[in-house]
Amino acid sequence: MRERSSWLFTVLCLVLIAVFGVDRSNAQSRPVPEVGVVADDNKSYFASYTEVDPLRHSFENSVMKGMVTFLGGDRWKLDLRAKRPLQRIYFPAQSKRSPVAPRVSDEIFYYPRVLGLAEKASARDKDWDWGLKLIYPGQLFAPLVVLASSSEARMVAATNWPPKKVKPLYGAERLTLLYEEDVPVNASVSYEAMVVDVKGNSASGDVPWQLALDRYRAWLDSHMPVPNYPDWMWEGQGFLDIFLALQSPFDIRPIRSLYQNYKHLYPWVLFWGQMTAPGSKICCALNEEMHPDYLPALPDFVREVVAGGGHAGYYSAPYYGTDSGHPRRNLETREGSDWLLTWIGKNKSYGANSYYVDTLGWSYYGEPAKVMNLFGSGLIPKDSLIEGVTDIYPAASLVAGSLAGSGDGRDGFCGAPYKTPETFDRTTFPRFGRYLFGDRLFYGGIANQDSTFWGNVRYWKRKDSKRLQVCGYVSYCEDNGPCEYGTERLAFLLGEKLDVRTPKDNEILDAIIQERIRANWWARRPVYLDTKGLELTSIPRDSKVEITRFRAKDGSTLFAISNPKLVAGLSFRFKGTSIAVPVKKIAIVE
């Protein structure tokens, strides 16, 4: 009898694997993710499971009925029917803490805002005090959140396809995904999620938060291809950033001279503020028409650039709203999509052959699949640069601002050169998003708040900026600098093209360009791998030496190295080999 039962058990396993593509024993070893809801009485309810078979667990109570199914790997599916109106669904929910280190002080939350934010778990340790409650897609670049230490990581990620609007939440060693969706009585909803637990060793380059992101990226790659960027975007070192509204009076001659002097490095020029009068200092007004003070000189110059084989474009944006009387127009609506497409068409009529779309990658503009389809259908041109990045939007991204952060600084996510999650309660952490999108085309530089650390002009000392005062940059840079050229160094270390407004007399910018030209950098299509596989324990923190790894298209390994203090005698290890750190402020080592 025992032999027959064993034989039947084996057959059942094989049938389950064949039908569901799932290893039954793998399912048994994993805890079933929790389901929580808030009903129309504003009370919370959690599911209690009954095992249907090794892959499926059912539940039913006074407000809901459903099933959680193991899909294999790290993935689960929730099928839920409402027995009374529901307002919010948490899947996976997490009623109990799930630490990834013996001490909460050794744990860090990683959050997908801007290009990555990090918050110590000890700074977000009050039960049910969730951190930032932002929406994917747009406000967040991926539908996930990670809790990690130097040896373990846990990640939850939404894996709905088509993608759905969701809020990843974190706090008190918990991670959850929130769907704010009204579900009427007898209506059904389904959600899919990934729950990842990994172990690693950061000291040897086996970094747990990277290992967790690898799982999500593998799933993403199975659902959509890597964006295919226009060949011309890979040419040159970046683009010239022209803020027209700072000029008064407007004069095309210095702009023409700047372009002629630098077009061999920056064959692309983008204009901000063509909608407002010179001297207005307004970069981003919602106005599709070019201000008459720029006519006809500016369009004539743009056509001149294009005729010479270069690329030029102007500012545009979805209708992000100005006040309650002029609200946001989501791109899923005819009114919203027509606004943006009309603006892009206007810019084309002014001679543009490339396009900048503000706020799109950093804001929520409606149903994810419909916004995503604006790219796939060509309604948003392939020759476009969007502000920010969102995993399902296949466009090049301007990520300037990911170092200093955004907002007024009161949320505490004030980034700065050398500021790390291990040593500060809250900071920006652009390595997080850059690692997830290591093969994407990013532009970093002077735009947004990252002008704070551009060049050696020390903008962080300005007393007329409330944000700079709140972030305490003067004392930070005195104690932790050098902060000079921090923006340029970050763009170099992350493998970003350059957003440049003032290319002259900048020693670090010049050094970056010289090294990239010498190494034939962009032709080799380097993929950013952060510190994966690097043993960096021999690099003293106070040396300010930073090292990142890249993989070229021919499989060779490249290292970007910043050594601002010209420290000699340092080395790191990769695959058992010791590699010397050059005594150069900027270096590429192969």
Image: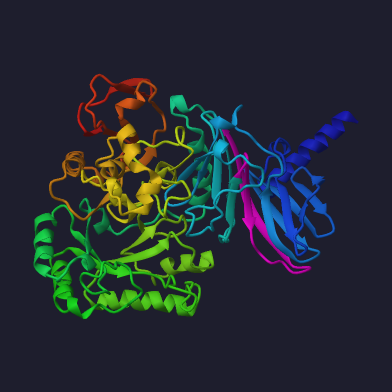
Which quadrant is the C terminus positioned in? top left
The spot of residue 27 in percent (x, y) is 71, 40
Q: Using the image as rendered, state which of residue 105 and residue 216 is in the foreground.
A: 105
The answer, for residue 557, to whether it is visible in the render is no
Q: Is 197 inside the magenta-drawn segment?
A: yes
Q: Is 33 inside the magenta-drawn segment?
A: no
Q: Using the image as rendered, state which of residue 111 and residue 378 is in the foreground.
A: 111
The spot of residue 139 in percent (x, y) is 48, 58
> Image point 52% across, 68% down: which residue?
366
Q: Please indicate whether residue 280 sits to the left or right of residue 101 in the image.
A: left
The answer, for residue 114, to whether it is visible in the render is yes
Position of residue 38 relative to residue 573, above or below, is below
> Image point 50% across, 73% down: which residue?
332
Q: Please indicate whether residue 69 sits to the left or right of residue 235 in the image.
A: right
Magenta-tinted stretch: 171-198
Position of residue 518 relative to residue 288, above or below, is above
The spot of residue 101 in percent (x, y) is 59, 29
> Image point 13% across, 54% down: which residue?
264
Position of residue 412 relative to residue 448, above or below, is above
Q: Main secondary structure of the magenta part?
A: strand
Q: Using the image as rendered, state which of residue 179 and residue 205 is in the foreground.
A: 179
Residue farthest to the right?
1
The spot of residue 327 in percent (x, y) is 48, 75
- Hey, which quadrant is residue 123 in on the image? top right
